[in-house]
Amino acid sequence: MTTRTTRSLEHPARDDIRLAGVLHALSDPMRLHIVHVLAEEAEAQSCAVFDLPVSKSTTTHHFRVLRESGVIHQAYRGTAKVSCLRREDLDALFPGLLDGVLRACSLESARLAGRP
């Protein structure tokens, strides 16, 4: 008999997500980049697709902060950990916040790149 264990990760319930925690999670440029990439993808993304200029342990930390604040949901698919935005929860709790942050992120990127 084979014993199969399911690995799961802790996520806050929708009612436990707090604005201060979300804003803190979004205040770091690396985490903001992760959120921006996830917002552009329809499917959950493996952590391996993110080529961040930091160590693996720092990357893990950034994903954990996003998960524990309620910004993303993570799950294991086989040996890979995949992430997606908790857009529905964030939009219900803080209408317009995520869209505003993502738009500001895009505008800042364009401004810093010298584009209008």
Image: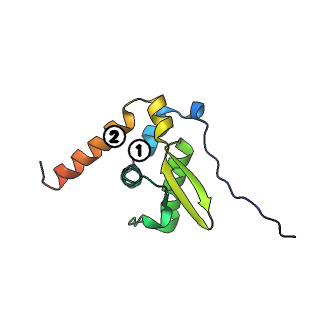
Q: Is residue 30 left or right of residue 111?
A: right
Q: Is residue 108 left or right of residue 82?
A: left
Query: Please, what secondary structure does the residue beneath circle 1 have?
Result: helix
Query: Please, what secondary structure does the residue beneath circle 2 have?
Result: helix
In this rendering, the count of numbered labels is 2
Residue at image coords 45%, 45%: 25
Residue at image coords 39%, 49%: 39
Picture coordinates of residue 114, whole percent (x, y): 12, 54
Q: Is residue 19 above or below residue 24?
A: above
Q: Is the Cβ of the residue at disc 2 closer than 8 Å to that at disc 1?
A: yes
Kindly identify which numbered label has been placed on residue 101: 2
Residue at image coords 53%, 58%: 82
Q: Amino acid at mark 2?
A: Val
Q: Is residue 84 left or right of residue 53?
A: right
In this view, the residue farthest toward the right is 1
Q: Of the residues under marks 2 and 1, which one precedes in the sequence?
A: 1
Picture coordinates of residue 1, whole percent (x, y): 88, 70
Q: Which residue has dot 1 on it?
A: 26
Crowd around label 1: few <14 · some 14–19 · many ≥20 (10 Å): many
Q: Is residue 74 above or below residue 48?
A: above
Crowd around label 2: few <14 · some 14–19 · many ≥20 (10 Å): some
Q: CA distance from mark 2 to mark 1?
A: 8 Å
Kindly identify which numbered label has been placed on residue 1: none
Picture coordinates of residue 60, whole percent (x, y): 53, 60
Between marks 2 and 1 in the image, the one whose residue lies nearer the viewer = 2
Q: Amino acid at mark 1?
A: Leu
In this view, the residue farthest toward the bottom is 1
